[in-house]
Amino acid sequence: MPELPELNPVIHGKLRLALLSLLSSVEEAEFTWLRAKTGSTDGNLGAQLLKLEEAGYVAVEKQFVQRKPQTLYRITNPGRQALTEYVRALKQLLGAALEG
């Protein structure tokens, strides 16, 4: 039996995977847009985005727009690469499961 691939534990969380997937399809996204798309609470969303930021997978920009704080997120090149590798490993894992 071939060795099964490791799935990146940073990406493997449901919300973190969703966030990277969403960010991979846009140039940048506001916190509020990500919250609406994922249906997450502010606290959980913030915690998961922080984990992705600490891993170097997302970049954060904070600014003020008409005196209101705005936080923008974008996927980094390492984040895009990690997501690609995760999807590749998942396909390999599912392929092995279907063959078995």
Image (spheres, grey):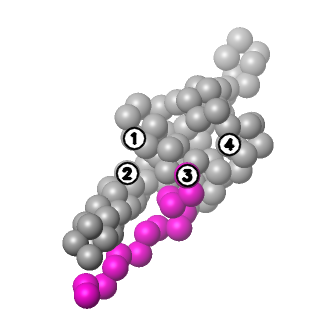
Binning the other alpha carbons within 10 Å of mark 3 as few (below 14), some (14 to 19) or many (20 upward) gives few
Identity, as a three-letter code, of the amino acid under mark 2:
Arg
Q: Residue at x 56, y 29 (%)?
A: 37
Q: CA distance from mark 1 to mark 4?
A: 17 Å
Label 1 vs 4, first from the N-terminus: 1
Give the SS element for disc 4. helix
Confirm whether the magenta stretch covers residue 6: yes
Q: Residue at x 22, y 72 (%)?
A: 99
Binning the other alpha carbons within 10 Å of mark 4 as few (below 14), some (14 to 19) or many (20 upward) gives some
Identity, as a three-letter code, of the amino acid under mark 4:
Leu
Q: Could you tell me which quadrant the N terminus lies in?
A: bottom left
Circle 2 residue:
80
Q: What x and y, as percent, mark residue 18?
A: 50, 44
Q: What x and y, as percent, mark residue 58?
A: 52, 48
Query: Which residue appears farthest toward the left when viewing the image?
Result: 99
Circle 4 residue:
45
Identity, as a three-letter code, of the amino acid under mark 1:
Ser
